[in-house]
Amino acid sequence: MLHNSARAIDMKLHLHSQTDPRRHEQEGPLIITGGEGVYVRDDAGRRYMEGMAGLWTASLGFNDARLAAVASDQFGRLANYHTFNHRSNEACIDLMDQIASVSPLAPCKIFLANSGSEANDSMIKLAWYYQAARGKPGKRRIISRKGAFHGSTVMGAALSGLPHMHRSFNMATDDILYAGKPHHYREARPGESEEEFVDRLIHELEAIILQADPDSVAAMIAEPVMGAGGVIVPPQGYFPRLRKLLDKYDILLLADEVVCGFGRTGNWFGSQTFGFVPDMFSVAKGLSSGYLPIAAVVVSDKLYQAIADEGQRNGVFGHGFTYSGHPVTSAVAAEALRIYREMDVVARARSLGERMRTRLAEALAEHPMVGEIRSVGLIAGVELVADRATGESFPAEARVGARVERACRAHGIILRNMGDVLALCPPYVIEPEQIDELVQALSFAIEDVRDELE
Ligand code: PLP
């Protein structure tokens, strides 16, 4: 174990991301000291299978040797350069090529950033810039959705439809409109079919647009599968209908592929799985297997042409980050994409996902504490309920999801609970038998908590 003082220093100094600060002062950190394949180790030497790939990030596990070698090599050749004012570097150019080769938008232009939040902020700025370029600067409002997570910057958090992301932050959300969440299990009316549910969501959204005035709405942003909102897999007909509605009112559709990108839903991108073509999309996390902070926005040619003309009128396109196109992060991301292609990540996510779906159904479909198991590709959510027949939730203060998450660790796996939903998003390098172990450990953990509750 690390010297006790490491724990004490963390408890004393570290204001943790997305953590209850007072609870942290009492309970302290889980300190991870090493990683190998799908496993990580803590400072007491305990080994866990990481069923969430960290934060939906480490698609290639926790110590891929090729990514380490590429980073080291790039550090030795050119450790820093920028991309302002026409500058570029070989690693960043290689990455452009790699992203374009899998992009569903072709031709496209690619803007680089450092995090999912920055990429989403950039999409909003690009949408505004585009609307101004077309002589429609009044088109400013952005539609997001209840339950969405788009990041923690000022705009990322404002776009997020999660109450804890807004509470007490005095957020500026005047220009954001929040549409309904496409979650049939929780949001459908009694007896409403998936088709009827989608129909209602689309009509409700149309009413929101008309009330706001379509000429005031620039774009809608959406995750193909909502991640942090509880792994919400939308009904198949939802996105094509959404796309059609937005086209009717001349509103852009921006896909947040930060979680879904690079194979996760069983296609290269979630937009392909759910049958729509966005005007631009953001990627991060899996882009570098989470090894270094990097993100990108892929922009359709139509938007780019208008943005480029506007940039020329302004003398410069006035947006970008010091580390946009950083050579080391770019080199690692380009290599990660090369590895994804070599391993045929799409086929792998589909076959591993099928195994995960089958095992989850076998172990938990009839469990009295499980209300819904939802999944697509290699991502799944298991929603725990107090009453399976009625779908009644546990009281929030019982913290049932958090207790199951803790019990998972006792069984040697790490998952993430969002309220009472347990998310599974393992690295693509997981083996089929390890999927079985992961699901078995989760069902043991649920049983443990069930025993405590009785
Ligand atoms: N978008 C989605 C869908 C996410 O899940 C996240 C992070 O979890 C973000 C955006 C924000 O990414 P970052 O934390 O890299 O800013």
Image (cartoon, grey):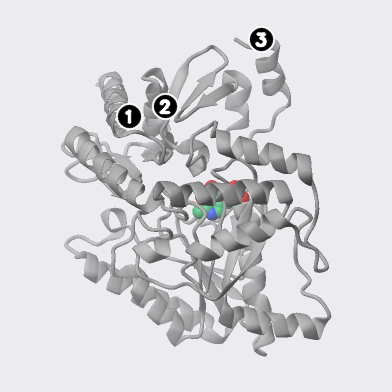
- The image quadrant that residue 202 belongs to is bottom left
Q: Nearer the viewer, residue 41 or 372?
A: 41
Quarter-wise, where is residue 437 in the image?
top left
Q: CA distance from mark 1 to mark 3?
A: 33 Å
Is 153 placed left or right of 382 in the picture?
A: right
Of discs 1 and 2, which sits in the foreground? 1
Q: Between disc 1 and disc 2, whose residue precedes? A: 2
Q: Which mark is residue 49?
A: 2
Q: Secondary structure at mark 3?
A: helix
**Observer-nearest of 33 and 89:** 89
Is disc 2 in contact with disc 3, using a CB cutoff of under 8 Å?
no
Image vertical order of residue 142 relative to residue 233, above or below = below
Binning the other alpha carbons within 10 Å of mark 1 as few (below 14), some (14 to 19) or many (20 upward) gives: some
Q: Residues within 10 Å of mark 2 (few under 14, many from 20)?
A: many
The residue positioned 25% from the left and 40% from the top of the image is 355
Disc 1 marks which residue?
Answer: 434
| Residue beneath disc 3 | 4
Mark 2 or mark 3, whichever is nearer to me: 2
